[in-house]
Image (spheres, rainbow, N blue to C red):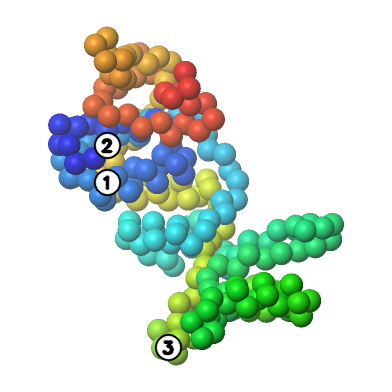
Amino acid sequence: MNDRSVRRLVIVGGGTAGWMTATALRRLLYPELSIEVIESEEIGIIGVGEATIPPFRRHNMLLGIEEREFVCATQATFKLGIEFRDWARHGDSYIHGFGPMGLDLEGQPFHQYWTRALRLGVAKDLGLYSFNVLAARQGRFMPTPTDAPKNTPLEDIVYAYHFDATLYARYLRRFAEAEGVRRVEGRIVDVRLRPDTGFVDSLVLQDGRTVSGDFFIDCSGFRGLLIEQ
């Protein structure tokens, strides 16, 4: 969105989706753009444990979020992979470890050797070839050390997080407001459209206030206040 004719951007809904959107766009777009988040304390945030995958770390890095501060603020734990119970059969467990699996041999991908061994009936547990799976099974973790040996699994430990979604939304709200994002408290009761285009023109709040904008983003979750109604 580099069209600078958009001067006022309105995000409908807070929570993790709304505040992640607000913080990312604040960092990526031009500083004179006004960003507002409409959020109601009456609705609240779905307080569940949020499970992420490794690209989420890049999102935090993009925003300039310091990992130690983030972990403390959201009560986060580190995640090395995803476990699927009863995956192939009842009682079975498969851990999908983040990061590389095995090593390529003589220019051939590791998985080609492993699947051939599987057909021959001599394949070993796939998890034995994953640094993350082995560490997860033993309940061990450490961030990538600064002096990690080159060409080893320690060189770039791939991980993600589990964290409290409510705490993360609050953390991002503080972060976004410090960057100039404005929060508007209120419940939306009506959406006004432009008669010539049918695009959203403004939102009417329960107390009668009107919030206008040039561009609207719906982060209201299952309610879909803009895209579903």
Query: Within 10 Å of the Cα at label 3, are there few (<14), some (14-19), or many (20+) other Cα atoms?
Result: few
Residue 193 vertical placement versus 151 (above, below) = above
* Residue found 19% across the figure and 32% down from its top: 6
Horizontal and vertical percent position of residue 66: 37, 64
Q: Secondary structure at mark 1?
A: helix
Quarter of the N terminus within the rendering? top left
Residue nearest the observer in this picture, 44 or 219: 219
The disc at residue 71 is none
Q: Earlier in the sequence, mark 2 or mark 3?
A: 2
On screen, residue 155 versus residue 181, left or right, reads: right
Residue drawn at x 48%, y 22% as measured from the top left: 228
Secondary structure of the residue carrying numbered label 3: loop
Q: In the rendered structure, find residue 35 and report the number of the disc placed on it.
A: 2
Count up the numbered dots. 3
Q: Amino acid at mark 1?
A: Arg
Q: Position of residue 213 (x, y in %)?
A: 25, 25
When the figure is inspected, residue 73 is found, relative to residue 222, above or below; the finding is below
Compared with 194, 136 (above or below) is below
Of badges 2 and 3, the one in the foreground is 3
Residue holding disc 3: 150
Residue at the image position 45 percent from the left and 41 percent from the top: 17
Q: Is residue 142 left or right of residue 210?
A: right
Can the viewer see residue 135 in this picture? Answer: no
Q: Amino acid at mark 2?
A: Ile
Residue 111, image x, y percentages: 60, 73
Instruction: Give the percent coordinates (x, y) of residue 9.
Output: 27, 33
Task: Measure how far apart labels 1 and 3 are at the Cα level.
Answer: 37 Å
Tell me the residue at 23%/27% (across/down): 214
Looking at the rendered structure, the kind of residue marked 3 is Lys
